[in-house]
Image (cartoon, rainbow, N blue to C red):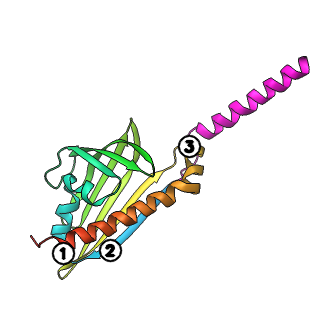
Amino acid sequence: MLVRHRKLLSGFIFAALTVGALLAPLPWLDRTAIHDEVVIARPAAQVFDFVATPRHWPAWHPASLAVAGATDHPLGRGERVAETFMLAQRGGVVVWTVIESQPPRTWVIEGVAAGHRVGTIIYRMTPSAERTRFEREFRYRSPTLLFALINRLTLREQVQAESTEAVRRLKTLLETQPPS
């Protein structure tokens, strides 16, 4: 009986340590950067204004379901917007804060969901005649070993696919709209 209890206790301790290790904050920095770019047949100012205006996000980004707050204009530094999202089969609400705005070239937002920083999105527009090279980069870090493992096994690939689709949709949407 005593041997059986020791085995159960050992198994419980092993399981608790494993779960603790998977959920504990990582002692090292594990970052991911998702990058996409496309050339859009529109001036940089038009591309900038469109992507920096949150009401447009659900029209081109597959993860963006709805936006609330300041949504009707290109957001400036310090402005915030709440976005309801479904990304890689995970949903929630993220509050984005503009941390850099240099029209028509750079726009950077940082997101927080449920009190935790979720990542940074950087948009860069490089003008060339009536075209713009648009770059989108989403940077995030793995807070735990479990997240890092899931990220490497499936999440990163899903996030990359959704980002690539978003940039493709953005190009199509802007190039089929009448020029403003």
Q: Give, as a three-letter code, the residue at label 2.
A: Val
- Seen from this angle, which residue lies furthest top? 1
- Seen from this angle, which residue lies furthest left? 180
Residue that appears at 78% across and 30% down? 11
Q: Can you tell which mark lies on residue 105? A: none
Q: Is residue 115 magenta?
A: no
Crowd tier of the residue under label 3, counting other residues whose Cα lies within 10 Å: few below 14, some 14–19, many 20 or above: many
Q: Secondary structure beneath disc 1? A: loop
Q: CA distance from mark 1 to mark 3?
A: 41 Å
Residue 25 drawn at (x, y percent): 56, 40
Q: Secondary structure beneath disc 3? A: loop
Whether residues under marks 3 and 2 lie with C-beta atoms below 8 angstroms apart, the answer is no
Q: Does residue 135 show up? A: no
Q: Which residues are magenta?
A: 1-30
Whether residues under marks 1 and 3 lie with C-beta atoms below 8 angstroms apart, the answer is no
Q: Which of the 4 quarters of the picture holds residue 127? A: bottom left
Q: Is residue 3 magenta?
A: yes
Q: Can you tell which mark lies on residue 42? A: 1
Q: Give, as a three-letter code, the residue at label 1.
A: Arg
Q: CA distance from mark 3 to mark 2?
A: 33 Å
Which callout, 3 or 2, points to the residue nearer the camera?
Answer: 2
Q: Secondary structure beneath disc 2? A: strand
Which mark is first along the chain, 3 or 1? 1
Residue that appears at 26% across and 71% down? 172
Which callout, 1 or 3, points to the residue nearer the camera?
Answer: 1
Instruction: Kindly identify which residue carries mark 2.
Output: 38
Chief SS of the magenta region: helix
Q: Which of the 4 quarters of the picture holds residue 15? A: top right
Residue that appears at 16% across and 56% down? 74
Q: In the picture shown, does residue 37 fall above or below 51?
A: below
Q: Can you tell which mark lies on residue 144? A: 3
